[in-house]
């Protein structure tokens, strides 16, 4: 039995993460359909020990992998193969999940729901995955109100520009599409792999990584990670990172990015790689920064391991949480 469990852990990958609204808890989803809830208060406390780095709750949320996790003010949203579930944060924190169904479960004919993004402006949720479309859900009633069609292959990533009423989507087809959420029309389509400075034909054209900040966009995957100005629709910096990047974020005056490779890369806006900080997983799928609590402000990364590395300082890994 012990050997079986060790094999189970050996083949585990962490696909998704989300912090609770209060910032005191971290939820992580893996390839087995499990969600684990960790107490950051316990793990970061003065009396922290090995037990403090284990989940306070683990439950099976989906039959397949938990591809995406996202938090609202009251719920944890999880996405798997063809379904999105909403779990009450209050109930999760009370650890009252015994036989408790999700508050909402929405079934879709979408294999691999890879990405979700909240749009606070109209309280909607953008969903993208294996049917090549972006679906917009009204979070008030759980109904889907529009479908954004244009990608020719499945969608990996989404980002919302709230002030511009835009949703951005990146897909296997190599395109980043910018959608006007008021009209449900695509207003721009950027085929990143066609730009010579970004193209890496040996890695393919797929876009796995996409995020925005005001008038700036980061995207990459097969093509090199690049920084774009959204007014001019042109790349201003291309980052010399060898592997395919899976998630990136703007943080203060830097860009933090992870993907193929056993590190978190710290990049400057001008295109320089400032540092590469070692991590436990050999390949990294997810990066998250806890901005919900100053006391528990950490960077967490997960990937091809049952470990989730925790950084209390961006310069080094402090410890690891473990499924």
Image: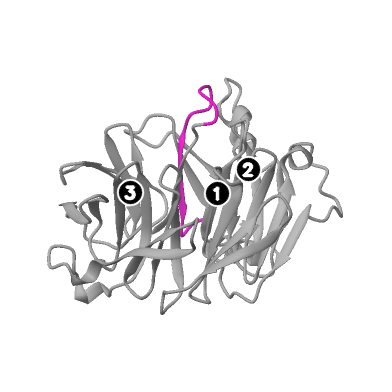
The extreme bottom residue here reads 152
- Residue receiving disc 2: 72
The extreme front residue here reads 183
Q: Is residue 306 visible?
A: no
In this picture, residue 264 sits left or right of residue 106: left
Q: Find out whether the residues at labels 1 and 2 contact each other: C-beta distance under 8 Å.
A: yes
Q: Find out whether the residues at labels 3 and 2 contact each other: C-beta distance under 8 Å.
A: no
The quadrant of the image that shows the N terminus is bottom right
Task: Work out how far the residue at label 1 is from the one at label 3, CA to CA, in angstroms.
Answer: 21 Å
- Residue receiving disc 3: 257
Task: Work out how far the residue at label 1 is from the one at label 2, CA to CA, in angstroms.
Answer: 8 Å
- SS at mark 2 in the image: loop
Q: Main secondary structure of the magenta part?
A: loop
Query: Which sits earlier in the primary sequence, circle 3 or circle 2?
Result: 2
- Residue plotted at (35% across, 35% down): 316
For label 1, the crowd category at 10 Å Cα-Cα, with few meaning under 14, some 14 to 19 and many 20 or more, is: many
- SS at mark 3 in the image: strand
The spot of residue 89 in percent (x, y) is 72, 41
- Residue plotted at (50% across, 47% down): 308
Q: Nearer the viewer, residue 37 or 172?
A: 172
The spot of residue 104 in percent (x, y) is 76, 56
The residue segment tinted magenta is 292-306
Query: Which sits earlier in the primary sequence, circle 1 or circle 2?
Result: 2
In the rendered image, the vertical position of residue 263 relative to residue 172, given as above or below:
above
In the rendered image, the vertical position of residue 289 relative to residue 180, given as above or below:
above
The spot of residue 292 in percent (x, y) is 54, 31
- Residue receiving disc 1: 118
Tell me which corner region of the image, top left, top right, bottom left or bottom right, holds residue 73. top right
Q: Which one is closest to the eye, mark 3 or mark 2? A: 2
| 21 drawn magenta | no
């Amino acid at each position: 039995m012990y050997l079986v469990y060790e094999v189970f852990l050996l083949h585990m990958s962490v696909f998704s993460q989300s912090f609770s609204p209060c910032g005191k808890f971290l939820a992580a989803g893996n390839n087995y359909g499990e969600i684990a809830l960790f107490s950051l208060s316990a793990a970061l406390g003065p009396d922290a020990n090995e037990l403090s780095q284990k989940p306070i709750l683990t439950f099976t949320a989906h039959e397949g992998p938990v591809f995406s996790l996202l938090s609202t003010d009251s719920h944890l949203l999880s996405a798997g193969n063809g379904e999105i579930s909403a779990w009450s944060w209050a109930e999760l924190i009370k650890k009252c999940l015994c036989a408790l169904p999700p508050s909402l479960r929405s079934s879709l004919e979408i294999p691999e729901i890879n990405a979700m993004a909240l749009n606070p402006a109209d309280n909607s949720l953008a969903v993208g995955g294996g049917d090549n479309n972006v679906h917009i859900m009204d979070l008030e009633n759980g109904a889907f109100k529009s479908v954004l069609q244009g990608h020719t292959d499945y969608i990996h990533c989404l980002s919302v520009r709230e002030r511009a009423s835009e949703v951005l989507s990146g897909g296997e087809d190599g395109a980043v599409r910018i959608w006007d959420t008021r009209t449900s029309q695509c207003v721009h389509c950027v085929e990143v792999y066609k730009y010579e400075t970004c193209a890496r034909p040996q890695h393919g054209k797929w876009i796995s990584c996409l995020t925005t900040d005001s008038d700036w966009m980061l995207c990459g995957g097969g093509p090199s990670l690049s920084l774009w100005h959204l007014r001019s629709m042109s790349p201003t910096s291309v980052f010399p990172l060898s592997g395919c990047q899976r998630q990136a974020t703007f943080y203060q005056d830097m860009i933090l990015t992870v993907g193929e490779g056993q590190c978190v890369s710290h990049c400057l806006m001008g295109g320089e790689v400032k540092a590469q900080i070692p991590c436990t997983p050999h390949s990294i799928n997810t990066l998250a920064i806890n901005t919900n609590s100053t006391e528990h402000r950490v960077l967490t990364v997960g990937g091809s391991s049952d470990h989730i590395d925790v950084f209390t300082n961006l310069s080094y890994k402090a410890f690891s949480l473990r499924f």
